[in-house]
Image: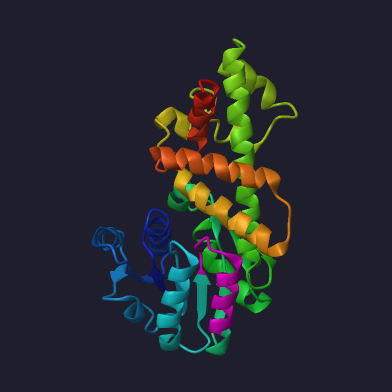
């Protein structure tokens, strides 16, 4: 079993660290929020006094942080104090350029590095069923795979430095666009007198089938586990969808790619967020779609 430092114990990081403890690893954790540290301690992790202290003697360092600037700040702090040749994994969702800068920093200090953003939401973090999209050298990915398997069920090597982040933002652009489409279809069905269940029974077994429909159906009833049956309590909050769609647009602009539907999806989610619904699950976008019909 490995000595693992885990920095960033929020809604995703906390359960992920807990799963590493359950797998038998020695986990030393840190977060700026006291409540998050307390929960990690209750889950069996040792708590460090700061991020630098957490990495002392660690074989593997994992970060789960809000944005690229936070990742680069923490990596600049901790990498000089890591054991030479140790592995550092970032599971945050950040911009591709920051991910590449983080890899370059690790390389300068002789550390192996992987960018490994996740898909699966808080449910996947708790259930250790996340998908990890990994970028980095083959040697680094091989070293990371076994520990990532303690937190997820699918580990994919997408390519070199930053490739994991590229895969994540492309995937979530598809997700954001498709959820709006599913929401529009159900809103139209309501106006046409078609029941939610009837539309679901047809679309889920026809050409309209997609993950947004069959796993996260945005109306109550057809998929019992979807947030629509729990008041749209977030597995993945709308504010986070805005973040990911914005990362996708930034990447598209930098690369010279045309993503008109991605841009429109970003605008729709930004409006939903601006109306005070950033904490609502992203499937709640159907509420915004319905509101547009009244304008």
Assign the N terminus to one quadrant of the image. bottom left
How would you classify the magenta stretch by its main secondary structure?
A: helix
In the rendered view, would you say 76 is above or below 93?
Answer: below
Front residue of 29/194: it is 194
Q: Residue at 43% across / 59% down in the picture? A: 16
Residue 220 in view (yes/no)? yes
Q: Is residue 269 magenta?
A: no
In the rendered view, would you say 157 is above or below 260?
Answer: below
Q: Residue at 60% across / 66% down in the picture? A: 96
Q: Residue at 62% across / 64% down in the picture? A: 164
Q: Which residue range is magenta in the image?
A: 90-106
Q: Is residue 105 magenta?
A: yes
Residue 191 image position (x, y, % from top left): 58, 14
Q: Residue 245 vs residue 253: left or right?
A: left
- The quadrant holding residue 103 is bottom right
Q: Residue 203 vs residue 9: left or right?
A: right
- The quadrant holding residue 44 is bottom left
């Amino acid at each position: 079993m490995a000595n693992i430092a885990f920095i960033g114990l929020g809604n995703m990081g906390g359960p992920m660290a807990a799963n590493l403890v359950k797998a038998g690893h020695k986990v030393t954790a840190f977060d700026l929020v006291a409540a998050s540290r307390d929960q990690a301690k209750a889950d069996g992790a040792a708590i460090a006094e700061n991020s630098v202290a957490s990495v002392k003697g660690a074989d593997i360092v994992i970060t789960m942080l809000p944005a690229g600037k936070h990742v680069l700040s923490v990596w600049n702090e901790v990498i000089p104090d890591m054991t030479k040749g140790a592995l550092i994994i970032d599971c945050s969702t950040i911009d591709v350029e920051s991910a590449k800068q983080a890899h370059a920093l690790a390389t300068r200090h002789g550390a192996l590095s992987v960018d490994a953003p996740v898909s699966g939401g808080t449910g996947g973090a708790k259930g250790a069923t996340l998908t990890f999209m990994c970028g980095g050298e083959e040697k680094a990915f091989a070293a990371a795979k076994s520990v990532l398997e303690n937190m997820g069920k699918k580990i994919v090597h997408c390519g070199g430095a930053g490739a994991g982040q590229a895969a994540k933002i492309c995937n979530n652009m598809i997700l954001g666009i498709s959820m709006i489409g599913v929401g529009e279809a159900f809103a139209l069905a309501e106006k046409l007198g078609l029941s939610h269940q009837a539309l679901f029974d047809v679309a889920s077994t026809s050409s309209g089938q997609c993950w947004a429909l069959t796993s996260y159906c945005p109306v109550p009833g057809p998929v019992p586990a979807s947030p629509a049956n729990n008041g749209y309590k977030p597995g993945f909050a709308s504010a986070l969808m805005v973040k990911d769609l914005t990362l996708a647009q930034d990447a598209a602009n930098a690369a010279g790619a045309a993503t008109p539907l991605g841009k429109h999806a970003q605008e729709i989610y930004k409006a939903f967020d601006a109306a005070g619904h950033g904490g609502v699950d992203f499937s709640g976008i159907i509420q915004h779609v319905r509101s547009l019909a009244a304008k």
